[in-house]
Image (cartoon, rainbow, N blue to C red):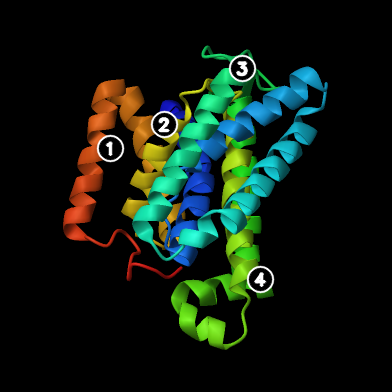
Amino acid sequence: MDDLISTGLIGLSLGGQYALLALGFTLIFGILGVVNFAHGGFYLLGGYVAYAAVHFLDAPFVVALLIAVLATAALGYMFESLLLERVIDDPLSSLVLTLGLYLVLTNGVQAVFGAESVDFTFPLSGVWRAGSFFVPIENMVLLAASLAVIGLTYAMIYRTNLGRSLRAMAQDRPVARAQGMRVGMLFPLAFAISTGLAGLTGALVSPIFSLAPHVGDPVLATSFLVVILGGLGSIGGATAAAFLVGLVEAYSSVYLGGSKGALVLFVLVLIILVVRPTGLFGRTVRGA
């Protein structure tokens, strides 16, 4: 029973990480209709910006997180407003453009920091014990931080005028434009929020696992998996699917082994998509 609880808490921390990634990914798809292949690159960039802030500027880890968020959000804003906006209505061109940005980010990081992983460790270590079960402290911090950011993101989307405008753009872009909503401002802001979430996730997670130029690849794959499972464009579905994937990954890896655990996860996804082709909460191609 204790092992079940410990594994479940670790799975929830993984789910929180995946939820942060999936929120940004599905936000961009739901509002802009763009599949952002550069999402893993912003995760990677966030990790390296935080690493540079800690190791070269001696910044506290919390400050490094803030710098990573600001840097990735600013780059995302500029990328959307200067480049992506020109091809926003052409799915193939936008896909190629975001893929090109991902290659630029990964190769740029490798040119600056090298191809090997860097020594970036989480500022807290040890084990949190409660009764007879225990969980690594960094996983609990990751879970708490993820839940806080998820809550703030939901509050922004569903309780602010900006969030209402973004959801209106996702549901019916022509009507939203007719109501006077400024696409030229909302699209870059949405992209900045998405890339800022990716950068924050990279800065939070990479010290726990690893930080190397190739870590963006599995991040992109996981984001796709979670968003498709939750339902394309569904923010609630992406969040629920993220925690489901985290729990399945944790339990299957512990009790079945790494390779079998991955197989269980993909079989579960296939079964759900056979039963629900639009995903857990998917209704339309767009719409939050």
Image location (x, y in percent) of residue 39: 49, 43
The amino acid type of the residue labelled 1 equals Leu
Instruction: Give the vertical position of 16 relative to 77 (above or below).
Output: above
Q: Earlier in the sequence, mark 1 or mark 2?
A: 2
Assign a secondary structure to mark 4. Answer: helix
Alpha carbons under labels 2 and 3: distance apart: 18 Å
Q: Nearer the viewer, mark 4 or mark 3?
A: 3
Q: Earlier in the sequence, mark 4 or mark 2?
A: 4
The amino acid type of the residue labelled 3 equals Phe
Alpha carbons under labels 4 and 2: distance apart: 31 Å
Q: Residue at x 58, y 88 (%)?
A: 179
Alpha carbons under labels 1 and 2: distance apart: 18 Å
Residue holding disc 2:
217
Q: Residue at x 60, y 44 (%)?
A: 146
Q: Is residue 86 left or right of residue 57?
A: left
Q: Nearer the viewer, mark 1 or mark 2?
A: 2
Instruction: Kindly indicate whether the residue at mark 2 contacts the one at mark 4 (C-beta within 8 angstroms).
Output: no
Q: Earlier in the sequence, mark 3 or mark 1?
A: 3
Q: Nearer the viewer, mark 3 or mark 1?
A: 3
Assign a secondary structure to mark 1. Answer: helix
Instruction: Kindly indicate whether the residue at mark 1 contacts the one at mark 3 (C-beta within 8 angstroms).
Output: no
The dot on residue 162 is 4
Residue holding disc 1:
265
The amino acid type of the residue labelled 4 equals Leu
Residue holding disc 3:
113
Image location (x, y in percent) of residue 177: 55, 82
Instruction: Give the vertical position of 220 relative to 152 (above or below).
Output: above
